[in-house]
Image (spheres, grey):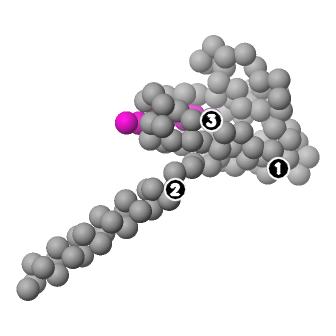
Amino acid sequence: MKSTFLKCVLLLALCSGAASAGSDDEALVIIKDFKFIPQEITLEAGQTLRWENREKRQYHSVWFQAMGEAEPEDYLFPEDSYERSFDRPGVYPYRCGPHPEMTGTVTVVE
Ligand SMILES: [Cu+2]
């Protein structure tokens, strides 16, 4: 009797964990006050990350310079967003084009 109850609790815990991971499929980075928030984010391979500019006026960009990519010509103005998915595990640092002091890191795990 008691062990059945325990199994149910365990199952519930497992299911709710899986459900929240599933519904949280799109990860989000907010750009505000010249910062990427959170500055470091961890994704699972295949997940999509979305950056949203929530400044009042300031534009920014998301530039994976360390990956050898060209600086994006399209800036993210307030209320703009940018999405990118990451298929391979690794550590991907990025920066803002116009503001070199604005940096962030995407870590992708299996
Ligand atoms: Cu910026």
Q: Position of residue 58 (x, y in %)?
A: 88, 42
Residue at disc 1, secondary structure: loop
Whole-Å distance between the Cαs marked 3 and 2?
A: 15 Å
* Residue 84, disc: 3
Q: Is residue 103 above or below residue 21?
A: above
Q: Which residues are magenta?
A: 104-110
SS assignment for the magenta stretch, majority: strand
Give the residue at x 91% y 46%.
57
User: Is the residue at mark 1 in contact range of ligand 1, meaning its CB lies under 8 Å from it?
Assistant: no
- For label 3, the SS is strand
Residue in the image at 82% along x and 49% along y: 79
Identify the residue at image location x=82%, y=23%.
73
Quickly name the residue at label 2: 24
Q: Nearer the viewer, residue 104 or 2?
A: 2
Which mark, by number, is residue 79? 1
Q: Amino acid at mark 1?
A: Glu
The amino acid marked with disc number 2 is: Asp
Q: Position of residue 101 (x, y in %)?
A: 73, 30
